[in-house]
Amino acid sequence: MNPELLKYNPQYPSVQDLKKKAKRRIPKFAFDYLEGGCNDELNLWRNEADFRDIQLIPQYLKKHRGVDMQTELFGHVYDAPFGISPIGLQGLMWPNAPEILAGAALKHNIPYVLSTVSTSSIERIAEVSQSQFWFQLYHPTENTLRDDILRRLEAVHCPVLVVLVDVPSFGLRYREIKAGLSMPPKMTINNFVQAALRPAWAFETLRVGIPEFATLKPYMDKSLNLSQLGKFMNATFTGRVDVDKVKAIRDMWKGKLVIKGVVCDEDMEASIGLGADGVIVSNHGGRQIDAGESTIKPLKGLTEKYGDRIKVMIDSGLRSGPDIGRSLACGAQFTFMGRPFMYGVAALGKKGGDHTIGMLKAQLKQVMEQVCCEKIGDFPGTLAG
């Protein structure tokens, strides 16, 4: 057995093992919210399946002096080339999930990205992460709200702002609609029954409190019911984030700026022209457009064309250390994952973040030894075909 994995829970050596445990531990509506994709979920399937087609070349006779996974990004040296993607309503999947993951990310020196619609506030995550977190902005329809969020981020010294551009409208996610987690949300009798069947989740939720949109709380009427909350969310965040909106943010934001949701040449060129420091090639985990490509498919072409002009990262579909290696071999300079870390926390609670990060590090280290990579920058030469 790989000795690196023995440092963590040997019952869960893979993301798939964590996923199976998470499904048994949290209510069905919470698991469906985490797991679901858009429409028929074809792009959700493609995201993972297309990774399997990428092959690396092992090399065994060459001298190998060991593995160094450190990666410099935006002036900070991280201990591994992957970070934790933002997910909305994280506290629905497991109470205090954002704080668990932000704390684990700090311990392992990798980036944690907080969502605008997560269940912990900017200020709380800044405290937990010692201001080493990134923030993903759902662009509000009102510029005054946008400006206030940016001021709050600046006040806690958030180093990286991620502007999400792939939600001109909310994706049609059939699992969420059936579970009552669409907008407006509702808690059905069936959902209450599902919660009662998961006592560990239910008791922890009662102890911590019902999850809420903590960052947005100052802007919401305290008397809002669930139906009114849905209307507030739709009115506050529906709309296209075009070049003019990103330019306004670039003019205000003094830290590093990343544009997430870029998958084509036109948007890459626009991002560079806007002065973005990086892009994340992403299709929102297959949750926005079912008819689109997987994220790994266009990655190599985009990195070859633009990798020397802007930091090119990837999100969506990665499920393992080998997938991180595949992404790096295709030219990505950094990688992000969302669902795997939520599986970890839902499966193992407070230990889930630490376990999942350590597990992925061990998997990536084993791949690097097989393909004779000493540093992350060695991966492009290992791509087969």
Image: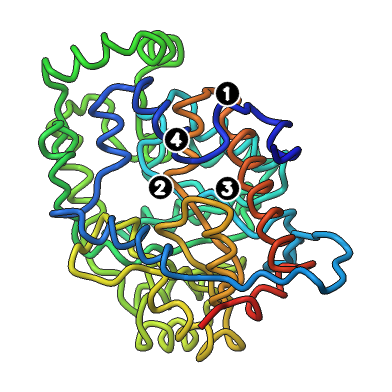
Viewer-proximal residue among 225 and 130: 130
Real-space Cα separation, disc 4 to disc 1, in angstroms: 12 Å
Instruction: From the image, tell me which residue sits under label 2.
Output: 116
Can you name the residue that lies furthest to the front here?
Answer: 61
Amino acid on which disc 3 is placed: Tyr
Task: Point out the tag, 2 or 1, that comes first from the N-terminus.
Answer: 2
Q: Mark 4 or mark 2: name the one nearer the start of the chain.
A: 2
- The amino acid sitting under disc 2 is Thr
Residue labelled with disc 1:
350
Q: Label 3 neighbourhood size at 10 Å, few (<14), some (14-19), many (20+)?
A: many
Report which quarter residue 289 is drawn in: bottom left
Q: Nearer the viewer, mark 3 or mark 2?
A: 3
In this view, the mark in front (2 or 1): 1
Three-letter amino acid code at the position of disc 4? Tyr
Image depth: mark 3 or mark 4 in front: 4
Q: In front: mark 4 or mark 2?
A: 4
Q: Earlier in the sequence, mark 3 or mark 1?
A: 3
Q: Earlier in the sequence, mark 4 or mark 1?
A: 4
Rounded to the nearest angstrom, the CA distance separating label 3 from label 1 is: 16 Å
For label 3, the SS is loop
Q: What's the residue type where badge 1 is placed?
A: Lys
